[in-house]
Amino acid sequence: MEEKKSAIDLTEETARRWLHERGVEIEDIGELVFYLQEKYVPNLKMEDCLENVERVLSKREVQNAILTGIQLDILAEKKQLGEPLQSIIETDESLYGVDEILAFSIVNIYGSIGFTNYGYIDKQKPGILVKLNEKGTGQCHTFLDDLVGAIAAAASSRLAHRAANTE
Ligand SMILES: [Mg+2]
């Protein structure tokens, strides 16, 4: 039991640390949630956005997706993947699509409104997503940009459902 608990803590702690180390702060994701929801939720507060991001990040399946995606980004950056996967992930080949499928596993948790939010944010690319999509930096964020968009979309859905239920 002890051992099981510490493995869970390690997953959450590592997922949060890797986000930070890859240049993404909770506040960055909170800003995306604010961007998505300010039109729909009257008197929206940043603290509510951050609270919903925290709740999404505390889910095990979200942490697993983060660890898996960021690990692949890091290995691609170090050129340690086998071909053809190395080239596909390194160049963020648009037909690859597994980065999006992994992100859907996060969006999925909070229902269909999450997909609308995810599609919107993926097209608009506000805030931190611009930075993550910069090319020629030597960094690879093929998975991370979709993960961050998905966490924001999921947190937005959670926030919207709660706002609707308290009206
Ligand atoms: Mg991507």
Image (spheres, helix red, strand yellow):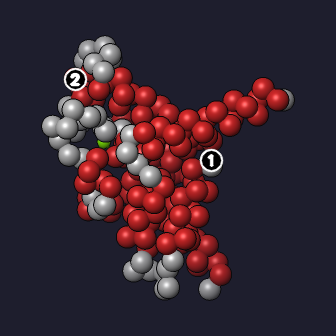
- Residue occupying image coordinates x 33% and y 17%: 81
Q: Residues within 10 Å of mark 2 (few under 14, many from 20)?
A: some
Q: Quadrant of residue 121?
A: bottom left
Q: What numbered label is drawn on residue 87?
A: 2
The residue type indicated by label 2 comes to: Ser
- Residue occupying image coordinates x 32% and y 16%: 80
Q: Quadrant of residue 165?
A: bottom right
Tell me if I can see residue 113 in this picture. Answer: no
Q: Does dot 1 land on a helix, a strand or a loop?
A: loop
Q: What numbered label is drawn on residue 59?
A: 1
Question: Looking at the image, is 75 positioned above or below residue 102?
Answer: above
Residue 116 x/y as whole percent: 39, 63
Left/right placement of residue 110 relative to residue 73 reads right
Residue 13 x/y as whole percent: 60, 39
Quarter of the picture containing the C terminus is bottom right
Q: As drawn, which residue projects farthest toward the top?
A: 82
